[in-house]
């Protein structure tokens, strides 16, 4: 890490400092140095730019740009900051997409919602929000949400007209002479969920696929700003309801860092339990959906059956099966009834009783081998270049897992290893998903044993140790938090302010969240 500090220190910087064990944090004095710093970091091995996160400071008339670089091989990471002007006609900075292809969508997101222009971006266009928000930059402080939402009919007409105009343009461009056409997969579809894929085909050959992910944009960052630090969980859970426990865990860690609080060992182990249950219920849905998309619906129903047993555990603990609000800053929300561990062991047994059928019938399925073994191959080099993560990265042989690379909760007490495959195909990704299901069962068994031992010895008090008090008002500060989400790495960048921005008197503290979704 010292070598990284020396490298960054050769540029004009306000500071370079150690942030966490595997992180260096630095601020550049000049935005013109960004390209040079980025190239130097890439040459040093930090080949993945995982996200670009602007923070709006209207009282200082600036955006603070945050760049998060990672070295997936040696676990060295750099957080680089730099200020740029806030005025729209001057709000620009060099694009890193030509150097780091993984920056593409993150820069387009920042352009869509903040109005930051990235000079040299190969395709800088709005994509994250629906057409009624284009050019309005809703995450700038002072944006009038109520006025925008009051024009509901006008906004809907804007979206409709855009679709109609796009259809007319496609008709002109493609015509009807041949077999080419443009198909719209979505915007709602039982396989893809709320996403629109613009698929251009020539007969049965796919020419191109252009994603329109604006339908998953729900302004969660804005919803977080409207609530206190506990009420924000309502929005955090909805990053993805399939695995909402890990998104809450990630957020809670950022709040605790700013508050300067540490949770109890009991709460840390309970977070492992809840996090792995979230991973399992998501993986079961993903595993079933994989075959459902192939027209093989039996496994989908089998997977949902097993999933119900783990949802029973969440319901017994929190009273809810999906939106559990079970993890919050300070620990976990509820005390533990030790009978819950029996319910969890029953769920593990259900999985293990059906595992052989899952593996034998479906992982060795000839249809799987025919359609997935040589499809969607991603190389290890592409994983680094496009900042891919989670199962996608591990299926290409890249050993990356935040639970191991930067242990949190009580994962430092867990015996586990990287679950990987070699060829990076769709089948390999399914294979790794299956391995991780087995791994999660092992982790849960270890956690159950630790909880039982701690409770019996008196080290843990399951009725009192679940929570430490977090102040309702936090000091000004910022933190990043990372967890190994079921879909890959989830990173949250949280900023708190004591002052009231002049353009938004309702925001006493400014949280900003940038969640990293899987590729």
Image (cartoon, rainbow, N blue to C red):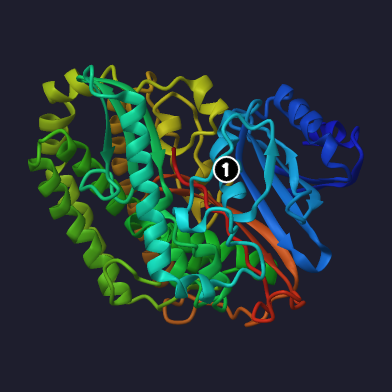
Nearer to me, 136 or 34: 136
Answer whether residue 452 is visible to the viewer in this image.
yes
The x and y percentages for residue 448 are 35, 60
Toward which corner of the image does residue 261 lie, by quadrant? bottom right
Horizontal side, residue 223 vs residue 494: left or right: left
The x and y percentages for residue 491 are 56, 51
Horizontal side, residue 474 vs residue 4: left or right: left
Nearer to me, 519 or 427: 519
Q: Quadrant of the C terminus?
A: top left
Residue identifier under label 1: 108
The x and y percentages for residue 71 are 63, 32
- The residue sitting at 42% across, 24% down in the picture is 396
Q: Can you say whether 209 is above or below 322 in the image?
A: above
Horizontal side, residue 276 vs residue 64: left or right: left
Instruction: Count the numbered circles shown.
Output: 1
Q: Can you say whether 90 is above or below 61 in the image?
A: above
Answer whether residue 457 is visible to the viewer in this image.
no
- The residue sitting at 64% across, 50% down in the picture is 53
Q: Quadrant of the N terminus?
A: top right
The x and y percentages for residue 395 are 39, 28
């Amino acid at each position: 890490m010292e070598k990284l500090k020396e490298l960054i220190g050769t540029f004009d910087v306000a500071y370079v400092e150690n942030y966490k064990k595997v992180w260096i944090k630095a601020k550049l004095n000049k935005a013109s140095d960004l390209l040079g710093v980025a190239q130097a970091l890439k040459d040093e091995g930090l080949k993945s730019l995982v996200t670009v996160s602007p923070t709006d400071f209207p009282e200082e008339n600036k955006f603070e740009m945050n760049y998060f670089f990672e070295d997936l091989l040696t676990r060295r990471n750099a957080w680089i900051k730099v200020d740029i002007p806030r005025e729209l006609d001057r709000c620009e900075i060099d694009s890193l997409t030509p150097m780091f292809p993984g920056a593409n969508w993150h820069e387009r997101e920042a352009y869509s919602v903040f109005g930051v222009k990235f000079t040299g971006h190969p395709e800088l266009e709005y994509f994250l929000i629906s057409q009624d928000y284009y050019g309005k930059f809703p995450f700038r402080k002072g944006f009038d949400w109520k006025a925008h939402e009051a024009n509901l009919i006008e906004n809907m007409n804007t979206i409709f007209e855009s679709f109609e105009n796009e259809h007319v343009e496609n008709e002109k461009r493609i015509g009807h002479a041949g077999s080419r056409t443009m198909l719209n997969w979505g915007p709602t579809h039982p396989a893809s969920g709320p996403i629109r894929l613009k698929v251009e085909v020539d007969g049965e050959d796919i020419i191109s696929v252009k994603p329109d992910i604006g339908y998953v944009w729900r302004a969660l960052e804005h919803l977080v700003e409207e609530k206190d630090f506990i009420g924000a969980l309502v929005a955090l859970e909805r990053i993805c309801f399939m695995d909402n426990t890990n998104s809450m865990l990630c957020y809670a860690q950022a709040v605790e860092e700013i508050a300067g609080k540490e949770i109890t060992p009991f709460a840390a182990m309970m977070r492992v339990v809840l996090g792995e249950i979230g991973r399992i219920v998501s993986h079961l849905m993903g595993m079933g959906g994989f075959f459902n998309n192939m027209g093989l619906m039996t496994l989908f129903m089998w997977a949902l059956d097993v999933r119900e047993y783990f949802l029973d555990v969440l319901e017994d603990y929190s009273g809810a099966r999906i939106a559990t609000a079970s993890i919050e800053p300070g620990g976990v929300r509820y005390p533990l009834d030790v009978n819950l561990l029996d319910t969890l062991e029953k769920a593990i047994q259900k999985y293990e009783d059906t595992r052989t059928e899952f593996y034998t019938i479906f992982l060795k399925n000839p249809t799987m081998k025919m359609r997935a073994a040589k499809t969607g191959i991603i190389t290890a080099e592409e994983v680094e270049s496009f900042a891919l993560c989670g199962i996608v990265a591990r299926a290409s042989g890249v050993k990356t897992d935040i639970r191991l690379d930067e242990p949190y909760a009580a994962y430092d007490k867990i015996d586990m290893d990287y679950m990987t495959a070699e060829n990076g195909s769709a089948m390999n990704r399914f294979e790794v998903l299956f391995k991780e299901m087995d791994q999660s069962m092992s982790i849960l068994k270890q956690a159950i044993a630790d909880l039982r031992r701690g409770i019996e010895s008196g080290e843990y008090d399951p009725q009192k140790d679940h929570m430490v008090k977090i102040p309702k008002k936090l000091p000004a500060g910022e933190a990043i938090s990372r967890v190994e989400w079921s879909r890959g790495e989830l990173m949250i960048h949280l900023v708190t302010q004591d002052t009231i921005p002049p353009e938004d008197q309702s925001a006493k503290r400014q949280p900003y969240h940038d969640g990293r979704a899987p590729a």
